[in-house]
Amino acid sequence: PTLRIRGFDIHKGYLDEPAQYDLIDALRGVLKAAPLFSPTTRFGKQMSVRMTSAGKYGWYSDPRGYRYEPRHPNGTPWPPIPEQVLRIWRDTTGLSRDPDCCLINYYGDSAKMGMHQDRDEADFTFPVLSVSLGDDGLFRIGNEERGGKTESIWLESGDVVLMGGPARLTHHGIDRIRFGSSRLMPKGGRINLTCRVVD
Ligand code: MD3
Ligand code: FE
């Protein structure tokens, strides 16, 4: 079933349980080659979310600002985007252009992500795709302008969200997760994958 909220296409239960486990397995290889790290914001504060990337570019942040980098902070190129992820991108976007970046966010017990816009990419006509795995996360959707009314929705393991068109520059964030709500990952936590065309 697809819900449409403020231009977001929310596919609840897009991945069944075997597909979720298969994706987690594929991500193990990525995390081994490109371990999670906690970036520092441009305000010098360490993020509570840990992250890494796959693909041509990875998202990176330090006091110099937000940007895409061709290498992990350990100096090696990011590993390739798993085929399972590319299949979801192609099926839901219908695009023949594959994403340049699959950002992997890991939320532990008290991790959250403040309201923000994703605007480090060159062309906002390309959508952003999100895949949720593991614990439930409370996703907040705002407006293109800062502030104003917001709507919240719980994203559960296997949910896929497509942000395209006018929704592409909407402010959004993750208020909190329900730590331990899923048994997908032995140590708990939430993983969110976002696929983007960068340049
Ligand atoms: C709306 N991640 O990585 S995914 C991010 O669950 C990010 O980890 C959150 O926001 C997470 O930047 C939310 C949903 C999402 C992702 C990208 C978007 C919503 C978006 C880009 C434009 C508009
Ligand atoms: Fe975002």
Image (cartoon, rainbow, N blue to C red):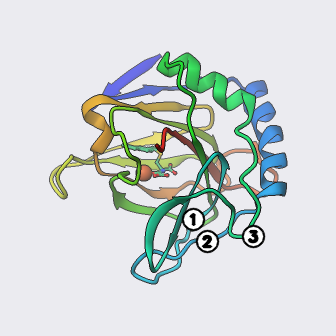
Proximity of marks 2 and 1: CB atoms separated by less than 8 Å: yes
State the image quarter where residue 131 is shown.
top right
Q: Amino acid at mark 1?
A: Val
Asked if residue 33 lies left or right of residue 189, the reply is: right
Q: CA distance from mark 3 to mark 2?
A: 13 Å
Residue occupying the point 55% across, 32% down: 159
The mark closer to the camera, 3 or 2, is 3
Q: Kindly state the secondary structure of the residue where label 1 is placed.
A: loop
Q: Amino acid at mark 2?
A: Ser
Answer whether residue 7 is visible to the viewer in this image: no
The mark closer to the camera, 2 or 1, is 2
State the image quarter where residue 132 is shown.
top right
Q: CA distance from mark 3 to mark 1?
A: 19 Å
How crowded pointer 3 is (Cα within 10 Å; few <14, some 14-19, many 20+) is rated as: few
**Measured from the top left, where is residue 188 in percent x and y?**
72, 55
Q: Is mark 1 within 8 Å of ligand 1?
A: yes
Q: CA distance from mark 2 to mark 1?
A: 6 Å
Per the image, the residue denoted by label 1 is: 49
Q: Of the residues under marks 3 and 2, which one precedes in the sequence?
A: 2
Per the image, the residue denoted by label 3 is: 74
Per the image, the residue denoted by label 2 is: 38
State the image quarter where residue 106 is shown.
bottom right
Residue occupying the point 61% across, 71% down: 38
